[in-house]
Amino acid sequence: MCATFVGNSTSVQELFHSVGSQFSSMFRRKAFLHWYTGEGMDEAEFTEAEANIKDLCREYQQYQDAIVEEV
C-alpha cells in the first residue's frame, strides 16, 4: 500500500520560530561563535542568518493571517 499527501500548511512556522529563538539566545551569548569565526566565517553572516529567519517567520505569519481572514 502506498499513499501520498501534498498539502499547504503554515504549521512549519512554529519550528522556524523555535529554531530562531534558540539561535538568537545562543548568538546573544556568542556561544560557540569562536568555533565558526576560527574557521573563517564572519559574525555578520550570523547576523544575516538571524534576520533571515525572522523575516521567514513574519512571512509565514502573514500567510497564516491571510488564510484566517478569508475564512
Image (spheres, rainbow, N blue to C red):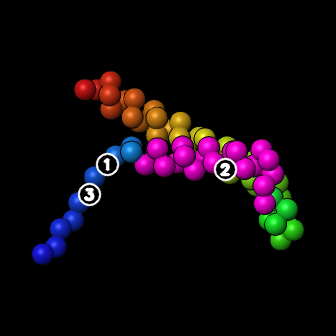
- The residue positioned 17% from the left and 68% from the top of the image is 3
Mark found first going from the N terminus, 3 or 2: 3
Residue with the most extreme top position: 69
In the picture of the structure, the residue carrying the numbered disc 3 is: 6
Distance, label 3 to label 1, CA atoms, is 7 Å
Nearer to me, 45 or 27: 27
- The residue positioned 37% from the left and 29% from the top of the image is 66
Left or right of 68 on screen, residue 35: right
Kindly state the secondary structure of the residue where label 3 is placed.
Answer: loop
Depth check, mark 2 against mark 1: the one in front is 2
In the picture of the structure, the residue carrying the numbered disc 2 is: 23
Is 34 placed above or below 66 here?
A: below
Distance, label 3 to label 2, CA atoms, is 30 Å
Q: Residue 11, how many percent across, how many down?
A: 39, 45
Distance, label 2 to label 1, CA atoms, is 26 Å
Q: What is the magenta range?
A: 12-32
- The residue positioned 74% from the left and 53% from the top of the image is 46
Mark 2 neighbour density, 10 Å: few (under 14) some (14–19) many (20 or more)? some
Marks 2/1 in contact by CB < 8 Å: the verdict is: no
Q: Residue 67, how many percent across, how many down?
A: 33, 32
Q: Report if residue 29 lies within the magenta region.
A: yes
In the picture of the structure, the residue carrying the numbered disc 1 is: 8
